[in-house]
Image (cartoon, rainbow, N blue to C red):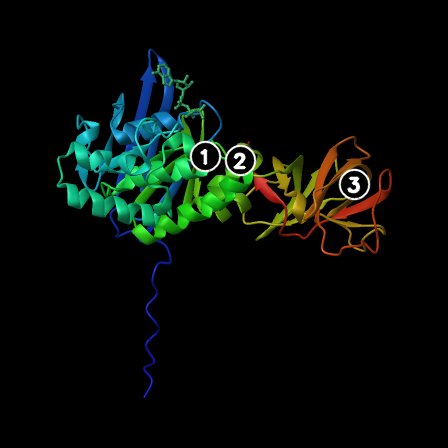
Amino acid sequence: MASSAPAPTRPSHPWNDPALEPYIRIERVSKSFSGFVAVDDVSLNIYRSELFCLLGGSGCGKTTLLRMLAGFEEPSSGKIHIDGLDMSGIPPYERPVNMMFQSYALFPHMTVDQNVGFGLKMEHRPRSEIADRVAQMLKLVRLSEFAKRKPEQLSGGQRQRVALARALIKQPKLLLLDEPLGALDKKLREHTQFELVNLQEELGVTFVVVTHDQEEAMTLSSRIGVMDHGKIVQVGTPQEIYESPSNRFVAEFVGSVNVFEGQVTASEAGRMRIRCAELEQALDVLSNAVAAPQARLWVAIRPEKIQLALQPPQAASNWTRGLVKEIAYLGDLSVLLIRLESGKTVRVTRPNVWRHEEESITWEQEVYLHWHDSSPMIVRE
Ligand code: ATP
């Protein structure tokens, strides 16, 4: 007889399980350089086997945070625990950590296999063991046939994989990567991103990656920590960061977005009516955000969530009108810039589903922009 007991509910992600010990625990860590605060009161948990990305613009403090994990910098205040151990005063070579630098720092005079085996040679491991492990690593990063080449005889992507093999051969529990794909062109970067994810899943090593490239962070990460001015402003899965940004900075930094200033005119459980001076009709928004009547707030709508029509929609809300000012055809999709009567320019993307558009939209045409009531996001300043 089938049991009537409910199936056990398991947290789908380790970070949803309050009982699980984080692998890295960063507690109120700050770092100042002669009075300049580069990392400002950061608290963050990272779990075993995660691929965690620190994402932010230039100078926001992400490399400094990574260097503190590696032990190249000591926090000015706060604590870092890795695998339950307090890292205060522990030098880099005594941490269960390996770091792969932005420049890869391969030895130019050594062959690929010598580069990969260098760390083991320094530890005076037996020659046969080094040869075996190098061969295993080169197979993993699919470079076996390049073992006798010098770095200068490799492409950027191949060099990146040598650096990765060299970092992984010592079997670190934690690998820190600073802009690992920065030197690669777009196509190779995309390809290598998937390889990196597969490799990380295969080995189960915890990766912490620093990047300023939001697309890269979205492709690679289990979770992303977005940094701004030394602070972590949001931590979440790529989808959470993109679909529910915690503030205007995150909304604008991750992907494109149209932002409108608005005022709440009515609200009830789960819904809000908002007036935006720049839009013709009111917004009727599905939202759990709590806002006082007449509160001023920011509403953000992603370009792909706006649809275009040549006739006015039947609804009394969630649409506006404008003139098509620019169209960029990118093959898979087109980007349109549409000027509203208020003077505001709105960005809209349309997938090019058909090879020949039935109802083509062209320059200077009047169009109606409309969206679903779940599309607008309410964001804090
Ligand atoms: P990028 O993407 O440009 O590498 P980042 O987010 O990694 O930027 P950090 O390298 O962490 O930024 O630097 C954060 C801030 O701290 C910057 O303003 C930088 O100038 C400053 N900084 C970093 N290291 C030092 C140092 N050793 N002495 C003084 N200031 C420093």
- Whether tag 1 and tag 2 are in contact, CB under 8 A, the answer is yes
The answer to whether residue 22 shows anywhere in this view is no
Q: In the picture, which quadrant includes the N terminus?
A: bottom left
Q: Residues within 10 Å of mark 1 (few under 14, many from 20)?
A: some
Q: Is residue 84 left or right of residue 237?
A: left
- Work out whether 224 lies above or below 374: above
Amino acid type at circle 1 is: Gly
Among the 4 quarters of the image, the one containing residue 378: top right
Which dot marks residue 280? 3
Residue position for label 1: 156
Ligand 1 is within 8 Å of the C-beta of the residue at disc 1: no
Residue 216 image point, x, y percent: 49, 40
Spatial separation of the CA atoms under disc 2 and disc 3: 43 Å
Q: Residues within 10 Å of mark 3 (few under 14, many from 20)?
A: some
Amino acid type at circle 2 is: Asp
Is 132 in front, or is 314? 132
Specify which label sits upstream in the sequence, 1 or 2: 1
Q: Is residue 274 left or right of residue 133?
A: right
- Work out whether 115 lies above or below 192: above
Is 18 in front, or is 49? 49
Spatial separation of the CA atoms under disc 1 and disc 2: 8 Å
- Work out whether 202 lies above or below 176: below
Q: Residues within 10 Å of mark 2 (few under 14, many from 20)?
A: few
Please, which residue is most extreme toward the front here? 148
Is 231 in front, or is 202? 202
**Local secondary structure at mark 2:** loop
- Whether tag 3 and tag 1 are in contact, CB under 8 A, the answer is no
Specify which label sits upstream in the sequence, 2 or 3: 2
Spatial separation of the CA atoms under disc 3 and disc 1: 51 Å
Residue at the spot 32% in from the left edge and 77% down from the top edge: 5
